[in-house]
Amino acid sequence: MNQPAFNFQTLNPDAIVDALWDTGLRVESGLTALNSYENRVYQFSDEDKKRYVVKFYRPQRWTPAQIDEEHQFSVELLADEVPIAAPLLLQDKMLHQHDGFYFAIFPSLGGRQYETDNYDHMEWVGRFLGRIHQTGKKRLFEVRPTIGLQEYIVEPRQVLENTSLIPAKLKLRLLQSLDRLSNTLQNCWHNDWTPLRLHGDCHPGNILWRDGPLFVDLDDARNGPAVQDLWMLVNGDRQEQRLQWDILLEAYSEFSDFDAHELSLIEPLRAMRMVYYLAWIVRRWQDPAFPRSFPWMTDEDFWRRQISIFDEQNKLLQEPPLQLMPAF
């Protein structure tokens, strides 16, 4: 479903300070904007020199009930000793509201970047993803969505068809390429997997390192197959990927079982993500931050490359899925 256009122009420093004041926090330092396109996130220190992060949710994206489910999941994970950034309970609640904005406050937990080529890091992350999914299996989200083609392909296709960002002379070719990709996805996407609550967007940028992994940003948490939280951590050629999967899943399996049949979902999930991502930028184009950050969206060459990317991904979907290394 297309969301109404919205930007954060009314979220000025005075409004942010007033919102924090309502929670009992007094801002001592200046507000430092952190990298976030979907929401608005700021770091600050209070009068006791304690550092916090405040996250203002984009209106109309999630309902309060859906945000509450995200928060409750993070609290469950923290209780199960998973290193995750969970919202603080202030004024007896985690989700607050001010001038139409919903927001939450988190402790500021710094860390260095997760090293994608460090197999020790990968082993640690695999172990903790097993623990995240052990908690995620206890029950499903009730109001957050489940990963599927409607949200990730059908609705984005409508967004791309209706946008003026795609040059007119390329739009038909792009939509035809997308339709071929969609038809192949219809044949290879299957639902014979057990859903569980996921991080949902577990790419390396959402993992910090502080004597071990620290998981951040459950904004995209939803129900889905376990492999969704694993495949974005794997890279390189087929041989490198097999080795990385072996490391990840051996560590993961210490805490949670993994159904190897879910490996056949890797390329479908990759295709769904690339289509959804394009439509996401189009949906947010009225937010001034997006044209500044994604100026290439107006270039013909960019859309020509997208056609090639869709066609190449369509071929990958028709190849045999990745096979794990045999155990000896």
Image: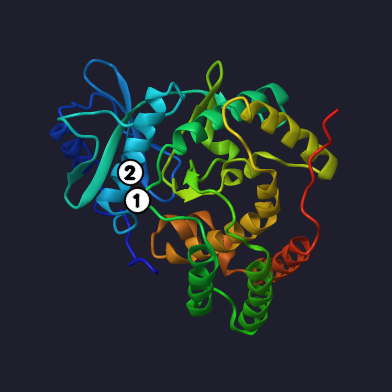
Q: Is residue 58 visible?
A: yes
Which residue sits at x=29%, y=18%? 50
Q: Give the spatial CA distance, label 1 vs label 2.
A: 8 Å
Q: Nearer the viewer, mark 1 or mark 2?
A: 1
Nearest to N terminus: mark 1 or mark 2 = 2
* Figure quadrant of residue 315: bottom right
* Figure quadrant of residue 88: top left
Give the answer, above or below, for where 9 lies relative to 218: below
Assess disc 1: are there few (<14), some (14-19) or many (≥20) residues with their C-alpha within 10 Å of its C-alpha.
Answer: few
Pick the front one: 207 or 285: 207
The residue type indicated by label 1 comes to Glu
Which residue sits at x=46%, y=58%? 290
Pick the front one: 283 or 85: 85
The dot on residue 66 is none
Q: Is residue 56 visible?
A: no
- Label 1 secondary element: loop
Give the answer, above or below, for where 119 lies relative to 278: above
Which residue sits at x=64%, y=55%? 270
**Percent x, y for residue 134?**
50, 32
* Figure quadrant of residue 327: top right
The residue beneath circle 2 is 69
Task: Report whether 82 appears left or right of 188.
Answer: left
The residue beneath circle 1 is 142
**Percent x, y for residue 277?**
54, 59
The residue type indicated by label 2 comes to Glu
**Percent x, y for residue 141?**
38, 47
